[in-house]
């Protein structure tokens, strides 16, 4: 029996109204054909395109393996000049055509020209006769069989224009298939970049749960975005790839084995204990924590291992509840609420004192033992528990309340963070809390430049959102692996500059208050622009190994309470 069901398809950034898509399955909700259902990676790709509308606006778009047409029809809604939906199965094409018709693309009222046609990746006779005429080619979750890698790469090569781009979102079920596809694209002269996709919604999880092959994604390697463009010159392409290989050597990554191990301190003895990571599968910077672990107040051995691997390879990790609907995260809601109120009240007190010093807190740069603003017009404030006992003696009741709330929050974060640091870099480093505080971004705060908090190894920051941080509030963006760069180099060579510029970036939304974002002091990062109407506070805990100290970010004795 064939059952047809209509689904509303949307993402947080997708314009209203949602698409209405028909899918088909039998009485047991099993899809009758691969293309007759929604796949979870479609949500991730569409959300990415919504956040980067310029990629498809006024462009000719081709969707390969379109299935029910979710991504292609979303591109039409986002302003593409034309969209061609392709698949090889006749019944699937009929479903895609019906969805396009239902969403109004054949009624003569839309500017975008939408068409549906058959295209078999393995049969060049079915390729578009216009050849390489598409500005953008998109695909979602299309690499799941070994024979797909070369066939799909050939189809991409046959349709992407000289200045065009191929964007593909997929779930990492089998890392070797994703790597084979990337290599096949390189053989056709493409420059290939991949990065983790941070967007995972309840709709995606629910969609993935409907099919075993889809559900594998969240339990394995997460979601990736692959982007491919044609090299301007073969020499540049070879140089860029060589630079990446050099970077892998610097990370102590064996590309042939796709593995990484923890960099050794030059004074460290060989204990024979290393962390080995399948680099192509090390995209899970988001470590989902199940409700049982949260209830027990401590991570499982597997959670610790995954968090440690991400810290070593990427320089950062987010530990978050597996479901956004969970009532509690690692830090309880009542602790977060007290921390938010106390931090907010204390910041208002500090900013009033900044004004009393004759400074404009929204415009001026200032550095005191209690609070700093490090960029002119930055509207981003870092306030902390001072190290100096003399300065601590000057603190107010509001300051004391804020510090107590940060210390309470730290006690809940410790059982999650400290085992991961010990697993990643060795328990003998004796990581301990060096500081607690809060970073608040005001409404209208601009995007920061990429920077590292410092240059020394052994210091890690833990951000704890006191309320949900979505894209509009400007979450922190990271450059993967940048903690391994030589920040003390007097000169950066051109090849290194190219490799650094091409390094993947990641801006994780912190949708569940009380989640933990841990990052290496040396990793390149920047706070995003706060386009919301509310203050965005992040409590933080700074950990340092034995003998380390953050002497750069705050002066020791210059108190804001002294004239």
Image: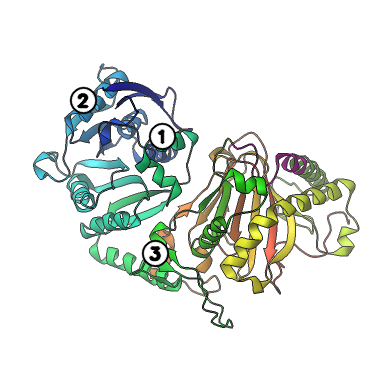
The answer to which of 290 and 147 lies nearer the viewer is 290
Q: Position of residue 336 (x, y in %)?
A: 72, 42
Asked if the residue at tag 1 contacts the one at tag 3, i.e. Cβ–Cβ closer than 8 Å, the answer is no
Secondary element at tag 2: helix
Secondary element at tag 3: helix
In the rendered image, which quarter is residue 521 located in? bottom right
Q: Is residue 188 above or below residue 377?
A: below
Residue drawn at 41 percent across, 38 percent down: 208
Q: Which residue lies under the disc numbered 1?
A: 207
Q: Which residue lies under the disc numbered 3?
A: 498
Q: Is residue 97 above or below residue 172?
A: above
Image quarter (top left, top right, bottom left or bottom right) of the N terminus: top left
Estimate the spatial distance between the alpha carbons at disc 2 and disc 1, rounded to whole Å.
Answer: 22 Å
Q: Is residue 217 left or right of residue 438?
A: left
Q: Is residue 511 above or below residue 37?
A: below
Disc nearer the start of the sequence (2/1): 2
Q: Which residue lies under the disc numbered 2?
A: 94
Start-end of magenta stretch: 326-339
- The residue lying furthest to the left in this view is 125
Q: Is residue 516 above or below residue 52?
A: below
Does the segment drawn in magenta span residue 327?
Answer: yes
Q: Categorize mark 1 by other alpha carbons within 10 Å: few (<14), some (14-19), many (20+).
A: some
């Amino acid at each position: 029996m064939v059952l047809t069901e209509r689904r509303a398809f949307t993402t947080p950034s997708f314009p209203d109204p949602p698409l209405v898509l028909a899918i088909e399955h039998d009485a047991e909700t099993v899809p009758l054909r691969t293309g007759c259902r929604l796949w979870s990676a479609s949500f991730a790709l569409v959300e990415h395109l919504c956040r980067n509308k310029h990629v498809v606006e006024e462009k000719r778009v081709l969707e390969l393996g379109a299935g029910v047409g979710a991504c292609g029809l979303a591109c039409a809604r986002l302003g593409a000049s034309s969209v061609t939906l392709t698949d090889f199965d006749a019944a699937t094409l009929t479903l895609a055509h019906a969805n396009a018709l239902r969403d109004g693309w054949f009624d003569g009222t839309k500017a975008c020209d939408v068409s549906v046609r058959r295209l078999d990746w393995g049969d060049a006779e079915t390729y578009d006769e216009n050849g390489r005429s598409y500005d953008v080619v998109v695909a979602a979750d299309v690499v799941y069989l070994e024979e797909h890698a070369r066939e799909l790469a050939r189809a991409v090569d046959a349709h992407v224009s000289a200045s065009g781009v191929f964007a593909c979102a997929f779930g990492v079920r089998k890392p070797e298939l994703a790597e084979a596809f990337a290599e096949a694209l390189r053989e056709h002269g493409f420059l290939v970049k991949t990065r983790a996709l941070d967007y995972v919604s309840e709709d995606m999880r629910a969609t993935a749960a409907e099919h075993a092959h889809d559900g594998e994604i969240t339990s394995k390697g997460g979601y990736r975005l692959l982007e491919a463009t044609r090299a301007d010159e073969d020499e540049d392409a070879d140089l860029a790839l060589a630079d990446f290989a050099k970077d892998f050597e610097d990370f102590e990554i064996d590309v042939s084995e796709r593995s990484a191990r923890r960099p050794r301190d030059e004074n460290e003895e060989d204990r024979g204990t290393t962390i080995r990571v399948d680099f192509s599968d090390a995209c899970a910077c988001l470590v989902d924590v199940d409700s049982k672990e949260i209830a027990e107040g401590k991570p499982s051995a597997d959670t610790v291992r995954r968090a440690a691997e991400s810290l070593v390879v990427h320089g950062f990790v987010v530990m978050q509840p597996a479901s956004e609907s969970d009532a509690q995260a690692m830090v309880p809601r009542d602790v977060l609420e007290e921390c938010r109120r106390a931090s907010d009240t204390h910041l208002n007190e500090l900013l009033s004192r900044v004004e009393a010093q004759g400074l404009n807190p929204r415009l001026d740069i200032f550095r005191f033992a209690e609070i700093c603003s490090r960029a002119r017009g930055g509207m981003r404030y870092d306030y902390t528990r001072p190290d100096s006992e003399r300065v601590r003696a000057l603190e107010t009741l509001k300051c004391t309340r804020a510090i107590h709330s940060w210390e309470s929050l730290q006690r809940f974060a410790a059982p999650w963070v400290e085992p991961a640091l010990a697993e990643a870099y060795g328990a003998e480093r004796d990581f301990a809390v060096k500081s607690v505080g809060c970073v608040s971004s005001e409404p209208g705060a601009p995007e920061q430049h990429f920077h590292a908090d410092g240059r020394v190894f052994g210091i890690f920051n833990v951000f704890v959102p006191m309320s949900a941080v979505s894209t509009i509030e400007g979450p922190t963006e990271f450059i993967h692996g940048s903690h391994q760069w030589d920040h003390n180099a007097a000169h950066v060579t051109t090849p290194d500059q190219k490799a650094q510029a091409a390094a993947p970036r990641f801006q994780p939304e912190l949708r569940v208050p009380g989640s933990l974002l841990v990052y290496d002091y040396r990793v390149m990062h920047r706070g995003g622009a706060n386009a919301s109407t509310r203050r965005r506070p992040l409590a933080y805990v700074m950990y340092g190994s034995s003998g380390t100290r953050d002497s750069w970010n705050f002066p020791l004795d210059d108190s804001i309470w002294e004239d």
